[in-house]
Amino acid sequence: MVEHSRRHRRRGQGELEALVLSALREADGPVTAGWVQERLGEDLAYTTVVTILTRLLAKGAVTRERAGRSFAWTSASDHAGLAAHRMRRVLDAESDREAVLASFVTGLGPDDERLLRELLGQPRSDGED
């Protein structure tokens, strides 16, 4: 009975999203949902892969282009870019942005605080507000 539950353990949405994004980053270019499904193997249904890709599209984590009657999918960012996007979404959802940022910064260790200060001292790239 225990072995049966191990084989069919339900993964969380975040875990599936991470697996799909990892597969997309390993691809040489845009790929289909079928390619992602084959790459991930196991017992992942095609419809589950499409659902995860669609959710990632809504989050801005992937892009898609028409490929015949289907779509070809690409990761929109590297791992660091996706983590930064998630952090911005959390910050945007809070009513007291200043308090959240202050709490985050005061919770940083000395090395991270130094790095953040260095990054904030750099000139902004073109196109940034």
Image: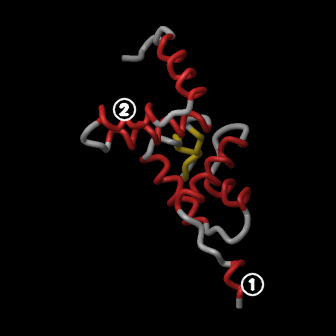
Q: Quadrant of the C terminus?
A: top left
| 90, 39: nearer the viewer | 90
In the current view of this chain or complex, which residue is farthest to the left?
95
Q: Residue 124: x percent and y percent?
A: 46, 12
- The answer to whether the residues at label 2 and label 1 have Cβ atoms under 8 Å apart is no
User: Which residue appears at 57% of the width and 27% of the height?
Assistant: 110
Q: Residue 37: x percent and y percent?
A: 67, 60
User: Which residue appears at 56% of the width and 32% of the height?
Assistant: 109
Q: Residue 117: x percent and y percent?
A: 50, 18
Q: Residues within 10 Å of mark 2 (few under 14, many from 20)?
A: few
Above or below for 107 versus 2: above
Which quarter of the picture shows residue 43?
Answer: bottom right
Which quarter of the picture shows residue 2?
Answer: bottom right
Tell me how far mark 2 sits from mark 1, CA to CA. Answer: 47 Å
Q: Residue 33: x percent and y percent?
A: 61, 55
Q: Quadrant of the N terminus?
A: bottom right
| 69, 110: nearer the viewer | 110
Instruction: Name the residue that disc number 2 marks.
Output: 102
Along the horizontal axis of the image, is 34 left or right of 60? right
Along the horizontal axis of the image, is 84 left or right of 36? left
User: Which residue appears at 45% of the width and 39% of the height?
Assistant: 87
| 72, 53: nearer the viewer | 53
Above or below for 31 versus 103: below
Q: Residues within 10 Å of mark 1 (few under 14, many from 20)?
A: few
Q: Amino acid at mark 2?
A: Ala
Above or below for 70 versus 2: above
Instruction: Name the residue that disc number 1 marks.
Output: 3
Badge 1 element: helix
Badge 2 element: helix
User: Which residue appears at 64% of the width and 41% of the height?
Assistant: 30
